[in-house]
Amino acid sequence: MKKLIAVVFVALLTSLAGSVWAAFTGRQKLPQAASATTVGTSTVAFSVALADVNNPDGTTGSGPLTWTNIDPGNTVWKLSERCLVIRSTINVLSGGGIQMYTDNYNPPGGIGGGFPKYLDLTPTISTDTNSDPAGLVMSTGTSSSFKLPMAWSVKSSSQIPTTQIAASDPNTGPTTSTPDNKYQWLFVQDKNTPAIAVASTTAFGNGTDYVTVINQLGIHFGQGFEFGGGMGVSKSYLYFEANFAGAIPNATYSTNVYLEAYTD
């Protein structure tokens, strides 16, 4: 009998509560304005440190991004053993960010300065695959026409190689939620990359979404120009991969990757 009474009591409360809410009628509403004003200067700035991909929050180092122990006959896309840790401040409302590219027609120090200049084998044709200088250039002297494609992926937290992030072809890699999902990777562009229809390559443009790693909306987390995380993203991790399918044994390939803060 006690159990039955309890059930009836709960049902009665529910009924009464519903009738009380249904009887609500607003009588009067007055607005009260609120406002705040900020001071300071809009800023787009960053610092960068080189780190081991297996311990990116540990001791930072110096030197280049590296790929070692590469067997061209058995290696296609491979994750770099180092990544870049970026600390950024971007507090503009729009039109600001950090872009990334190579500039292989203009190696630092000029020709003979230690990095090869890319040599276009078909300079009179500006829309074939030879026209794109992006990537790692073979160091066979002061200039070379041999290059290897590179791609990049930026994360808001460090990733464990193989289990959380893995190399993948940005065009043909897996589309599932796996560490080698292709959609996280974007091809590295050069400052002189032209539009190449046969390769579905768009021309480099300063401040364009494709080459922007971070902007006021956050990190660039997908191929479809998605940005997220907001201005609160102050630390991010930039990973690189390269395709060694076209490499030859006992050779060195190199380039310089440039990060550049901008407003527009």
Image (cartoon, rainbow, N blue to C red):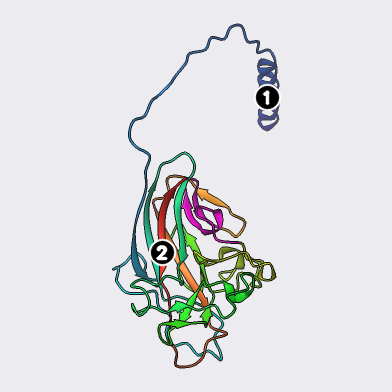
Q: What percent of the width, then of the height, locates residue 151? A: 53, 69
Instruction: Look at mark 1 in the image and give the residue it sits on.
Output: 14
Q: How many numbered circles are shown?
A: 2
Q: Is residue 170 above or below residue 206?
A: below
Q: Secondary structure at mark 2?
A: strand
Q: Secondary structure at mark 1?
A: helix
Please tell me which residue lies in front, 7 or 187: 187
Q: Is residue 218 magenta?
A: yes
User: What segment is highlighted magenta in the picture?
Assistant: 203-221
Q: Residue at x 42, y 68 (%)?
A: 257
Q: Quadrant of residue 3?
A: top right
Please tell me which residue lies in front, 243 or 27: 243
Please tell me which residue lies in front, 194 or 185: 194
Q: Is residue 167 magenta?
A: no
Instruction: Look at mark 2 in the image and give the residue it sits on.
Output: 258
Q: Residue at x 52, y 65 (%)?
A: 192
**Measured Cα–Cα span from mark 1 to mark 2:** 65 Å
Q: Amino acid at mark 1?
A: Thr
Q: What percent of the width, then of the height, locates residue 31? A: 52, 12
Q: Is residue 134 above or below residue 13?
A: below
How crowded pointer 1 is (Cα within 10 Å; few <14, some 14-19, many 20+) is rated as few
Q: Nearer the viewer, mark 1 or mark 2?
A: 2
Q: Residue at x 64, y 67 (%)?
A: 196
> Which mark is first along the chain, 2 or 1?
1
